Image (cartoon, rainbow, N blue to C red):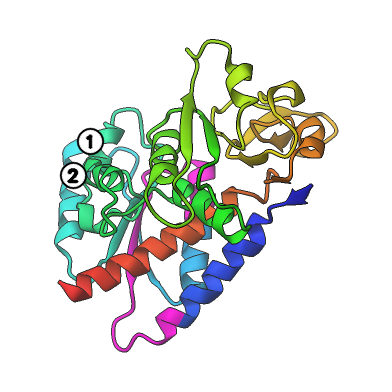
Amino acid sequence: MELIDGNKIAADIVTELKAEVAQINGRKPCIALVRVGEDPASVSYVRKKEKTAAEIGVTSRIILPPVSISQAELCALLDALNADPTVDGILVQSPLPKHIDEVAIFRRVSPEKDVDGFNTLNLGKVAQEDETGFVACTPAGIMELLARSGVDLKGRHVVVVGRSLIVGKPVALLALQKKAGANGTVTICHSSTTNLPALTRQADVLIAAIGRPEFVTADMVKPGVVVIDVGINRVPDSSKKTGYRLTGDVHFPTVAPLASKITPVPGGVGPMTVAMLMKNTVKAFRLGQAR
């Protein structure tokens, strides 16, 4: 069994981007990070994105509207960022306050600056295999993890557990694409799937993104499977100072011995998300310069 080290692969991508940005003369790529309110997890995530941007040489513009901001005011803020030629990428940190329509806000971000890859147009471009679109960061990170770990999906059965627009659907589309590293045969499973273990046992590559702690167990996989565990769940644990432990959607102790390769949690898919966000931002800058 080989651990797929997301921390190392993400660090490699950051190093590559740093070298690329250093070669850019004049204005550097810029990302606007919009965080509404003081949700502790959101504060931590935005700080991590800001730190990684600084390491690469990408300019980050932190915008902190009050939690009381209205839908119309937030839309107006995004419209101004969409029109600003010095901003290449825009990320609206979720979750947003309950009075804000999150889907409408994500769609308000210009497709050309949608470095999170959540705009409807960009999801359509993934389906059409249009390289000018932006892929959501976690699915893009999964494909990078597989490629850089020597896993070619061509002709292999890829089973995705989960059908979210953030992970399940886009990663299935990416695995299907007619391009190097992809060309997989894809099955998507979800909460209404009948006899789920019978399908997951067919997987050459299993991508677990269902949001249920340690859901995938040893009896659900075949020997030699490649396992990508997207889940990150907090499970109560009184032995930990925090009162909880982090676990994935896969029961690592029993599944790992059967796998040929597997991502740990933490340290697998998670670190890739920020790295791919920065890769998308540099891409947005390049595409903007070419227009």
Extreme-front residue of the structure: 155
Q: Which amino acid does the dot numbered 2 rest on?
A: Cys
Picture coordinates of residue 201, whole percent (x, y): 65, 25
Closer to the eye: label 1 or 2: 1
- Which residue does the image show at 22% across and 35% down from the upper left? 104
- Which residue does the image show at 55% across and 57% down from the upper left? 147
Q: Which amino acid does the dot numbered 1 rest on?
A: Ala
In-front residue for pair 36/151: 151
Extreme-right residue of the structure: 239
Element class at badge 1: helix
Left or right of 149: which side holds 289? Answer: left
In-front residue for pair 276/94: 276
CA gap between label 1 and label 2 equals 9 Å
Mark 1, other Cα within 10 Å: few <14 / some 14–19 / many ≥20: few
- Which residue does the image show at 29% across and 58% down from the upper left? 131
Which residue is label 2 attached to?
Answer: 75
In the rendered image of this protein, does residue 28 appear above or below residue 263? Answer: below
Q: Which residues are magenta?
A: 20-46
Picture coordinates of residue 235, whole percent (x, y): 70, 28
In the rendered image of this protein, does residue 131 appear above or below residue 28? Answer: above
- Which residue does the image show at 24% across and 42% down from the upper left? 124
Picture coordinates of residue 242, whole percent (x, y): 74, 38
Mark 2, other Cα within 10 Å: few <14 / some 14–19 / many ≥20: some
On whether residue 274 falls in the magenta region, the answer is no
Element class at badge 2: helix
In-front residue for pair 166/109: 166
The answer to whether the residue labelled 1 contacts the one labelled 2, judged by CB atoms less than 8 Å apart, is yes
Picture quarter with the C terminus = bottom left
In the rendered image of this protein, does residue 198 appear above or below residue 170? Answer: above
**Lower position in the chain sequence, tag 1 or tag 2:** 2
The label shown at residue 104 is: 1
